[in-house]
Image: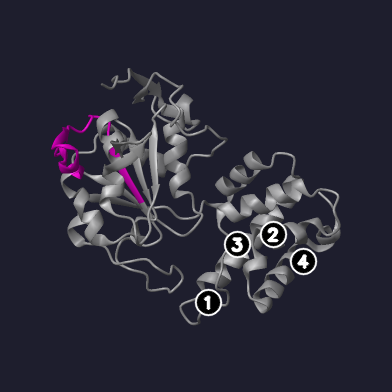
Amino acid sequence: MTTIPTGQTFNVAATFGVNAKPGLEVHGFADDAHPQIPVRQPYVFRPELLRDVLAYLHAANGDGLFLTGPTGSGKTSLICQIAARLNYPVQTVTCHGRLELNALIGQFVLINGSTRFVHGPLSVAARDGHLLILNESDLMDPSELAGLNDILEGQPLVIAENGGEVIQPHPQFRVFATGNTAGSGDRSGLYQGTLRQNLAFMDRFRVISVGYPDADTEKQVVLAAAPKLPLDIIDKMLRVAEDIRRLFLGSSEGEPELTLTMSTRTLVRWATLSLTFKGAPNVFEYALTQALTARAEPEQQEAIHRIAADIFGDYWQATP
């Protein structure tokens, strides 16, 4: 028998550090000790994305919420950091081509010599009012994901394998899915293994696009992650990231010149590694290699380092 957690309302402006209407509140939970509440970390919320997620948490209306965008743009961290501030427990699953629906619902497991049915992340989230996050959902077999159609609409989850157990979805149960594509397949060739998803499944989702933050927001993100890094160094890192992304995206007239990009996640990694290896020779180049360019083709690694050296100037050989 599970205990239904006590609800609590949170002031949006104070909770998320954004400008919001006075008195605007959002529902969450009072218990902040649940082991599956994400760890709260410094985070800069983009108001338009925060608005869309909070609107979904307030009223799902039979929908899931699909977040699509390039790698490292902050799709999962957005959900988790909102959940951390609202004391929402989260069940997270990283999807792949061999993941089956039964693994999400539950399965029989041998425990101390006897077989017991262990509920999976979908069952636990639906029963207890948690958030279910299906990361990289476009890597999963669409025929398996289609098994979620009914529960997304609020229908009970019937577990035939466990004697026909019926789980009525908790009012606060929500389903999020993330993907580098929007379920229509990958035309860029950059995201190997992604699959075109079932139209009926995708039709049950609201879809929001999560791009890389604007320069001012991204600067705050990097500063929050590496507060001891000088501002002029952060500005130069942002300029390097901007140039790499421009060459990665290409133009309408030409093909992209780079096959990898600097995500916000990679940018933060570069900044924090620069502090980790503070005092080492050529620290910014060394940190950039670990953060990004060690996985680049030699010609592209050289091109990226040349961009960074031009932007950093004398700092390229200096220490932070």
Residue at image coords 26%, 49%: 102
Q: Is disc 1 in contact with disc 2, using a CB cutoff of under 8 Å?
A: no
Q: Earlier in the sequence, mark 3 or mark 1?
A: 3
Q: Is disc 2 in contact with disc 4, using a CB cutoff of under 8 Å?
A: no
Quickly name the residue at label 1.
256
Q: Gap between marks 1 and 2, in whole Å?
A: 23 Å
Residue at image coords 86%, 49%: 279
Mark 3 is on which residue type?
Glu
Is 182 positioned to the left or the right of 303 in the image?
A: left
Q: Quadrant of the N terminus?
A: top left
Image position, residue 61 (x, y; %): 19, 39
Q: Gap between marks 4 and 1, in whole Å?
A: 21 Å
Quickly name the residue at label 4.
309
Image position, residue 299 (x, y; %): 67, 79
Residue at image coords 21%, 48%: 148
Q: Is disc 4 in contact with disc 3, using a CB cutoff of under 8 Å?
A: no
Mark 4 is on which residue type?
Ala
Please tell me whether residue 162 belongs to the stretch shown in magenta.
yes
Q: Earlier in the sequence, mark 2 or mark 4?
A: 2
Residue bounds of the magenta highlight: 151-177
Q: Is residue 54 above or below residue 196?
A: above
Q: Which mark is residue 242?
A: 3
Q: Gap between marks 2 and 4, in whole Å?
A: 16 Å
Q: Residues within 10 Å of mark 4 (few under 14, many from 20)?
A: some
Report the mark closest to the observer, 3 or 2.
Answer: 2
